[in-house]
Amino acid sequence: MKQPLILALDIGTSSVRAALYNGQANAVPRAFAKIERMLAVTADGGAEIDADEAVTQVAAAIDALLEKTDAEITHVASCSFWHSLVGVDAKGKPTTKVFGWADTRSGKYTDALKKRFDENETHNRTGAHFHSSFWPAKLLWLRKDFPDVFSKTERWLSFSDYVALKLFGTATTSVSMASGTGIFDIRKCDWDAELLKFLKVKPANLPTIVANDSDTFTLNKKNAKRWPRLAGGKWFLPVADGATDNIGAGCVTNTQAALMVGTSGAMRVAYEGDPPDEIPEGLWCYRINRKMVVLGGALSDGGNLAQWMRDNLRLGRDADEVVRQRLGTPSTIKIAPFFNGERSTGYDESATGSIVGLTAAHDAYDIYRAAMEAVAYRFADILGRLETVFKIEQIIASGGALRESPVWTEIISNVLEREMTLSGARESSSRGAVLLALESLGRI
């Protein structure tokens, strides 16, 4: 505890976590704080949170951590959820809620984007399909349906950019966060001019992209007064949590795939180099920084679907054990795992969940098992597409849903017909942010 430490922030949709790490990227025992939260789900497809309330939760996590330790903190590294959008006016005050990736209200405008642009060409340029997860559809929705809000918005930001604005007084973003917007040229590492022109958004209306991946910031006067122990600390801009999850799990070559099941799910390959010449249909490609790329697919249904099953089917604590005992018997129920919509690989805005093949001979545990298997087959689809680009030799699994459910890990391994290594890092996303920081500092 006497050595200088790094404070790591993991800003997720379901919680904000703060932890301390040493110079070897090892977590300091008992130096951890977690503030739980949920994005509000609305009947019309919204998934949102109040911007200032969300910043307060970030601050609360920092407060809680600082109360647990008097260690010297020299740097702050952070990661944040991808694909969010919030507008601010000329004074930096929010003009909208923070819209999360699961907000589908802009889905009706993806067809307009597909008619106006060659989606394959745009996908290969930005790394993103046209979908409500990304900024083009959201910005078009806001411009068409809420013109007053659109006109008074000075800047459009990711939530992590809004945090930077509040902490440092500057609306600046990392290449990583910008690349997850769907409005960023992943090869030029700059905002996509063609999409901006169509959406009637100028580069000045977006956050400034940091000049160097290693650039750091310091707290403004207000926050330096609140946290005097952090006043002299150097803060790295947030990197996307999906990218840092790969790094924290030790999955950083194009022969390794990280398979994560938390609230949602993802399978990603991270490597040093350029994006593929042709990004496979159904997959996305973003930046970790200017020298590293991450290619993969994301599922809207992951741990959230398993939890929905446990809650609504009133399954007992022994649900996973019951499923494990039945694995030797073929499952005859088929589930379309789109209860929370579809992202990879079809990006169908109208996709919904369904259960097929249910008979009176089945029970709730059979349905629960079928849901686990359905998610596993979605991962198999992603893996197949990844292997059109790279030969995957190792799969490293992470995420709370898999750590808490060995039987689900076994099911996925069986469907993929691959052995999987469960990552030893319980907080792989925050650890990955720390590793990137240590690399920027020249310590590793």
Image (cartoon, rainbow, N blue to C red):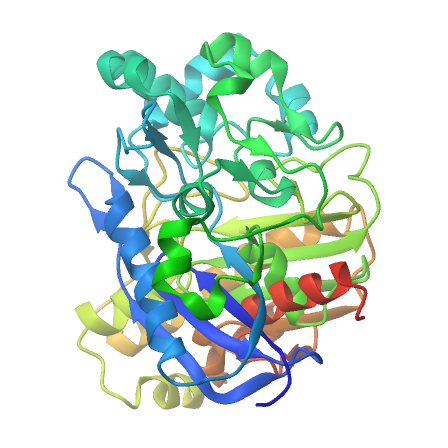
| 6, 194: nearer the viewer | 6
Vertical position of residue 300 compared to residue 206: above or below: below
Q: Residue at x 62, y 14 (%)?
A: 193
Q: Quadrant of the C terminus?
A: bottom right
The image quadrant of residue 43 is top left
Q: Residue at x 29, y 52 (%)?
A: 54
Q: Position of residue 44 (x, y in %)?
A: 18, 35
Vertical position of residue 352 compared to residue 87: above or below: below
| 42, 91: nearer the viewer | 91
Q: Residue at x 72, y 67 (%)?
A: 438
| 71, 278: nearer the viewer | 71
| 230, 419: nearer the viewer | 230
Q: Residue at x 32, y 35 (%)?
A: 104
User: Is 270 left, or right, of 113 in this rendering?
Assistant: right
The image quadrant of residue 248 is bottom right
User: Is 132 left, or right, of 435 in this rendering?
Assistant: left
The image quadrant of residue 1 is bottom right
User: Is 185 left, or right, of 105 in this rendering?
Assistant: right
Vertical position of residue 377 compared to residue 119: above or below: below
Say whether residue 331 is visible. no
Q: Position of residue 407 (x, y in %)?
A: 48, 83
Label tally: 0
Vertical position of residue 366 compared to residue 105: above or below: below
Q: Position of residue 281 (x, y in %)?
A: 65, 35
Say whether residue 435 is visible. yes
